[in-house]
Image: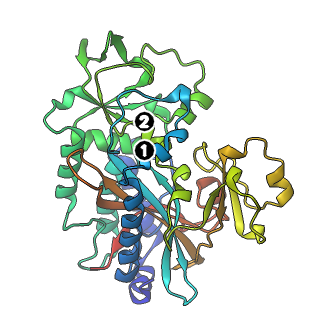
Amino acid sequence: MLPEIRKRYNDTFTDAQYLAFVEHVKDSFPNTLEFRLAETPVFVPHDLRDKLIAAGEQIIDVIVRPDFMEKTDRAIPSDQRVPNETRHCSLVTFDFAVCKDENGALTPQLIEMQGFATLYGYQAFIGEQYQQFFYCPDGFTPYFHGLDKTGYIAALRELFIGDENPEQVILLEVYPETQKTRIDFAVTKAYLGIEIVCLSKIRKEGRQLYYEKDGRLIPIRRIYNRVIFDDLQQNFPDLQTEFHFTDEVDVEWIAHPNWFFRMSKFTLPLIDSPYVPASYYLHELESYPPDLENYVLKPLFSFAGSGVKLHITAEDLDAVPDKENYLLQRKVHYEPVVSSPTGGVKVEIRMMYIWHPHEARPRLLTNLSRMSKGEMIGVRYNKDFDWVGGNICFFEP
């Protein structure tokens, strides 16, 4: 992608720069960085940028359809349904692999989608650090709709806090000080002034929730939710809490927890787009595709890639006892589109939106990127590589 810019970046890059960059990030928010920072951002040409935007709008067309809630209702486990669901999902993200089409042109292919939080605070911070420490061409930006960092943070503040007292808005997580994404919590607190609160510390009286600060019980009006049910159940099954997500309480959610299930792998078979690989609910297939080697099996209700099977046979599919809980998806072939000193690197781009209750559609704000040389994008598949990890895209003007 953009070979002249990539060559200039690589030619001016030094290991000393990178080490200084990493140390600065660590020093800015001590004891919070627990994932690898890539040696480079991703510079995205305008034609791929336009395809990413078009892909997002085609997916949003499905989300805003009048029948979307009905079609995705089965996605919400009955014992995890949270009351007072909103029709709009406050936070929307789409993950795209960067691939090549039959003509050799760069094209995005949807991997996953989330009606859930991601690193909204951290991305504004890390984008600024890449610009400070490394070469970045004039006019390239990680933002959309003419935003800069100041405007972006203002947009987050409007969504997260609005007219509320920031003291009554919290970021909710389970043992936040141990989470791998805790640097984002710290950045969000620094930018927006909202407290980071553990689920175990929430107090409940009737329908009202509170947290304690400086010896005071403070009413909670809004919850920026970072708790994932799957993580809560698997890793903290014995956690004692006064508040349970299924309780009737007087709070606003950002984003409402039910959307974690609605806007997920479950949604993929509903979308017909050249940017979305063919996807099927396993139990609805009367016969399997003849080229199963080109498909992957995914559990509908799992987190962070757990349970995914990359190599499957018809016998494997026949043996699945609960086919209604699985998705068969055509494989996506990541193209190593970024040149590094140690070889080509694959890229996944997350497009990040917010959706106000008064807006008809989600609004695209910024992005997140991850680079990989392993079989899959996640950290566990890239432990022994360099020029991989989390970063951000700068888009050609």
The amino acid sitting under disc 1 is Met
Q: Which residue is mark 2?
A: 257
> Residue 166: horizontal and vertical position, in percent?
19, 32
Task: Pick the quarter of the image with the N terminus.
Answer: bottom left
Residue at the limit of the structure toward the right, as seen here? 315
Check disc 2 and report its element: helix, strand or loop. Answer: loop
> Residue 238: horizontal and vertical position, in percent?
59, 18
Say few, some or many: other residues with alpha carbon within 10 Å of mark 1 (under 14 / 14 to 19 / 20 or more): some
Above/below status of 26 relative to 208: below
Disc 1 from disc 2: Cα separation: 14 Å
* Quarter holding residue 58: bottom left
Which of 109/150 is in front? Answer: 109
> Residue 195: horizontal and vertical position, in percent?
29, 30
Check disc 1 and report its element: helix, strand or loop. Answer: helix
Q: Which residue is mark 1?
A: 69
- Judged left or right of residue 267, residue 130 is left
**Dots 1, 2 in contact, CB < 8 A:** no
Above/below status of 257 relative to 36: above
> Residue 21: horizontal and vertical position, in percent?
39, 61
